[in-house]
Image (spheres, rainbow, N blue to C red):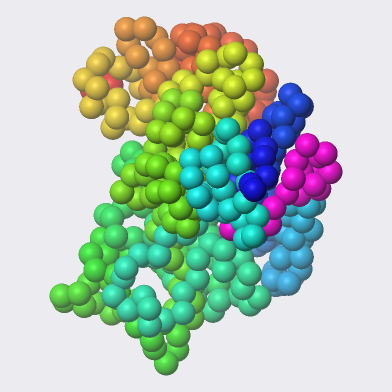
């Protein structure tokens, strides 16, 4: 006889534990399933560990620039064991805290193992079978392994296995020139490794505007990272000195020989072993669970939150999925995914932060728009810190004066962009900020000036 619960939650990423807390606070019982590490990608192999190591890499970079600030230092020598120990000391409390909060909750029963559906209301984990009227999927995603020629013949790294690597690569070759590849590339270059980034597209972060891609390329190359764009046919092969990575299957230029290869070409959802077909839950061609505006699947009572629903691959979108589900089920508050404004950041140094529409997307609408741009060299705070790479760009609807989107690439821009984002959520015109008085000296103080210099987008 299956055990009975009010709810089943599968996966302990950003959305699942928070939802369990809300449901149990309402007096409902929860069966919670996690097969490996509590906290999901963000805590274990994503945001927290990588940004901790990015911070170490930033310190190394600044130490190498010490002479610019009036100091003489000995050569900077990284200790990967100590870098990882610092990272793990930050990760462990977060992971353990999530698990402890669930196990200490008297209305939560934690099951450890792989969950699979046996019906639309029934789930099995090993020998345990349980039922609930509502089931929530929060199973996240993992690195995609592209079907490249030779990929099965060589050892390769993903974002997860690279974090576990106990030595610094002599030459790290990264296949993929977007967020994960660029963050790891700059990080390991600052740790003293030779780094080559190979990208199939004609530019880095190809989903961004061309001026953003060009500025990112310049930043990466200034660090001494080799970038090979337009790699039409990437293939791998064993080599006496490590791994050979070719970029053209016809007229092959000189291949890149790396000691290690990182595959950073995207993510895939962890839905393959859930037995979704037994529950009748539909997925798209890539395995993402299809959901409506409230995160509910085609099967009433089954929801999907976070990376596995394809509605956003970020911690903040996963947490917002939880907020949407909880608001609709518990608060009589009809929140929905479509109310969410796209926002994300890439944590190279300096960071790139983007909200709303890109310039290219605005142009495609055909509507009259305004644009404002300013280089970070015009930001006093950036000049004082000696970090002037990048620029700011904002787009505004010429008829309504509403902000359509922005791309901010520069020191502090991952924080500064939120004044623009909050203005968008408030539905307020850009003049709300352009007439505001911001604190000097800050990065944010340039944003009113940026908006005061808007010109027609031609």
Q: Is residue 104 located in the magenta-colored stretch of the structure?
A: yes
Instruction: Indicate the position of residue 319 as horizontal and vertical percent values.
Output: 60, 34
Which residue is at the front of the view, 360 or 194?
360
Instruction: Indicate the position of residue 29 as horizontal and vertical percent values.
Output: 72, 34
Q: Is residue 7 located in the magenta-colored stretch of the structure?
A: no
Numbered range of the magenta stretch = 99-114
Is residue 420 shown left or right of residue 254? right
At x 38% / y 86%, what residue is drawn?
238
At x 74% / y 60%, what residue is drawn?
88
In the rendered view, would you say 342 is above or below 63? above
Is residue 59 shown left or right of residue 144? right
* Residue 95 visible from this viewpoint: yes
For residue 457, which quarter of the picture?
top left
Where does the C terminus fall, quadrant-wise?
Answer: top left
At x 64% / y 16%, what residue is drawn?
331
In the rendered view, would you say 212 is above or below 174? above
* Residue 66 visible from this viewpoint: no
Is residue 256 shown left or right of residue 315? left
Instruction: Indicate the position of residue 450 as horizontal and vertical percent values.
Output: 47, 22
Is residue 67 shown left or right of residue 93? left
């Amino acid at each position: 006889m299956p055990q009975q619960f009010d709810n089943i939650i599968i996966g302990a990423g950003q959305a699942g534990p928070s939802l369990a807390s809300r449901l149990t606070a309402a007096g409902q019982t929860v069966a919670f399933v996690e097969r490996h590490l509590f906290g999901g990608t963000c805590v274990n192999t994503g945001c927290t560990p990588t940004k901790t190591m990015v911070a170490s890499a930033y310190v190394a970079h600044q130490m190498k620039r010490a002479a610019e600030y009036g100091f003489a230092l000995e050569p900077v020598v990284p200790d990967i064991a100590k870098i990882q120990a610092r990272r793990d000391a930050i990760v462990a409390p977060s992971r353990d805290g999530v698990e402890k909060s669930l196990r200490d909750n008297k209305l939560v029963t934690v099951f450890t193992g792989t969950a699979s559906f046996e019906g639309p209301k029934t789930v099995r984990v090993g020998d345990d079978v349980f039922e609930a009227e509502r089931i929530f999927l929060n199973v996240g995603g993992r690195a995609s392994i592209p079907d490249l020629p030779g990929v099965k013949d060589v050892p390769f790294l993903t974002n997860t296995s690279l974090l576990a690597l106990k030595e610094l690569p002599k030459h790290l070759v990264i296949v993929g020139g977007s967020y994960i590849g660029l963050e790891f590339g700059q990080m390991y270059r600052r740790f003293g490794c030779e780094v080559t980034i190979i990208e199939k597209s004609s530019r880095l972060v190809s989903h961004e505007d061309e001026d953003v891609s060009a500025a990112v390329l310049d930043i990466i190359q200034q660090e001494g990272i080799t970038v090979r764009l337009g790699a039409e046919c990437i293939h791998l092969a064993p080599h006496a000195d490590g791994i050979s990575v070719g970029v053209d299957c016809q007229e092959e230029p000189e291949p890149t020989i790396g000691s290690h290869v990182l595959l950073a070409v995207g993510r895939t959802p962890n839905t393959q072993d859930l037995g979704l077909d037994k529950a009748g839950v539909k997925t798209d061609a890539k395995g993402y669970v299809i959901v409506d505006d409230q995160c509910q699947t085609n099967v009433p009572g089954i929801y999907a939150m976070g990376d596995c629903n394809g509605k956003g691959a970020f911690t903040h979108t996963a947490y917002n999925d939880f907020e949407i589900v909880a608001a609709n089920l518990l608060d009589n508050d009809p929140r929905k995914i479509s109310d969410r404004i796209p926002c994300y950041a890439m944590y190279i140094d300096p960071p790139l932060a983007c909200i709303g529409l890109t310039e290219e997307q605005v142009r495609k609408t055909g509507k009259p728009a305004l644009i404002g741009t300013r280089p970070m060299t015009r930001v006093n705070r950036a000049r004082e810190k000696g970090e002037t790479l990048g620029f700011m760009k904002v787009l505004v609807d010429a008829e309504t004066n509403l902000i359509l989107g922005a791309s901010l690439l520069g020191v502090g821009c991952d924080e500064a962009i939120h004044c623009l984002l909050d203005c968008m959520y408030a539905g307020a015109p850009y003049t709300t900020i352009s007439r505001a008085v911001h604190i000097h000296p800050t990065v944010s103080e340039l944003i009113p000036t940026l908006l005061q210099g808007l010109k027609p987008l031609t």
